[in-house]
């Protein structure tokens, strides 16, 4: 509790705004929470990454999936779930060596820029068990280390119908949060401070999910994605500049 209070109201408010905006983007487009909020937290509250973002992401993911169950394609879930679990285990091993070092900020920014690049590639990759497993494994590594795990699966689903695309990405996102939290907890990298910070941000998550719900049917993914990528790029760039000066 003391570490959260020590942030100061200004820094905490910046985190809350970033999580609020990221939650709306995640709900509508199936990506955006980690890409936007993680670099912001890395700038103003680095001690709470990746644990607090993963805990917030757990609520966001399940909150988004719960209203889109009918849009899920269930036979695509097993290979994606398996890949995310493998990625989380690999990332937990890496995280033990980088989370408390100066390299972590560069890792967060790098994952965001990689995510932007994957999102802009425009490739049409067939959705098959192998492609789902590989994309989910990469997403599991990225997501566990930095809470930016959506882009590889977004690449697979970017040409699908908007509601199905968002539903599938959100269900893999939610499952990924479970796997990532479990792996990092076993590695001793999620503690009470991460839980308290996540709980303090929870009202903004719930408000964002509520506000985004009536927009989901009218929102066009093609219009949302540039906003999400632009905001994520700005946040990652600011993080890099801050780290270098």
Image (tube, rainbow, N blue to C red):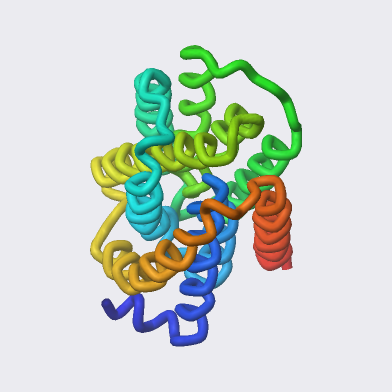
Q: In the rendered view, would you say 11 is above or below 82?
A: below
Give the mark count.
Answer: 0
- Viewer-side residue, 242 vs 160: 160
Residue 82 percent across, percent down from the top left = 36, 22
Residue at coordinates 67% horizontally, 40% vertically from top-left?
114
Residue 63, horizontal then vertical, whole percent: 35, 53
**Observer-nearest of 113 and 240:** 113
Q: Quick check: can you spot residue 72?
A: yes
Res 21 → quadrant: bottom right
> What residue do we see at 28% from left, 69% from top?
196
- Give coordinates of residue 29: x percent, y percent: 57, 48
Is residue 61 shown above or below 71?
Answer: below
Residues 196 and 46: in front is: 196
Q: Position of residue 122 (x, y in %)?
A: 74, 31
- Determine the residue positioned at 30% across, 42% down: 178
* Between 123 and 35, the one nearer to me in the picture: 123
């Amino acid at each position: 509790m003391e570490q959260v209070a020590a942030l100061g109201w200004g820094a905490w408010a910046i985190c809350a705004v970033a999580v609020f905006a990221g939650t709306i983007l995640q709900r509508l487009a199936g990506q955006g929470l980690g890409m936007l909020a993680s670099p912001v937290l890395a700038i103003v509250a680095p001690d709470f990454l990746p644990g607090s973002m993963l805990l917030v992401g757990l609520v966001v993911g399940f909150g988004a999936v719960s209203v889109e169950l009918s849009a899920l394609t269930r036979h695509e879930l097993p290979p994606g779930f398996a890949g995310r679990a493998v990625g989380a285990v690999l990332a937990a091993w890496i995280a033990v060596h980088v989370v408390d070092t100066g390299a972590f900020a560069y890792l967060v920014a790098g994952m965001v820029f990689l995510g932007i690049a994957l999102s802009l590639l425009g490739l049409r990759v067939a959705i098959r068990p192998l492609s789902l497993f590989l994309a989910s494994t990469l997403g599991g590594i990225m997501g566990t280390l930095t809470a930016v795990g959506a882009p590889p699966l977004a690449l697979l689903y970017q040409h699908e119908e908007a509601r199905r695309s968002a539903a599938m990405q959100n269900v893999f996102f939610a499952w990924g949060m479970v796997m990532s939290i479990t792996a990092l907890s076993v590695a001793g990298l999620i503690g009470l401070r991460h839980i308290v910070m996540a709980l303090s941000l929870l009202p903004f998550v719930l408000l964002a999910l509520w506000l985004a719900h009536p927009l989901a049917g009218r929102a066009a993914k093609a219009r949302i994605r540039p906003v999400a990528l632009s905001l994520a790029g700005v946040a990652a760039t600011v993080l890099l500049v801050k780290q270098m000066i």
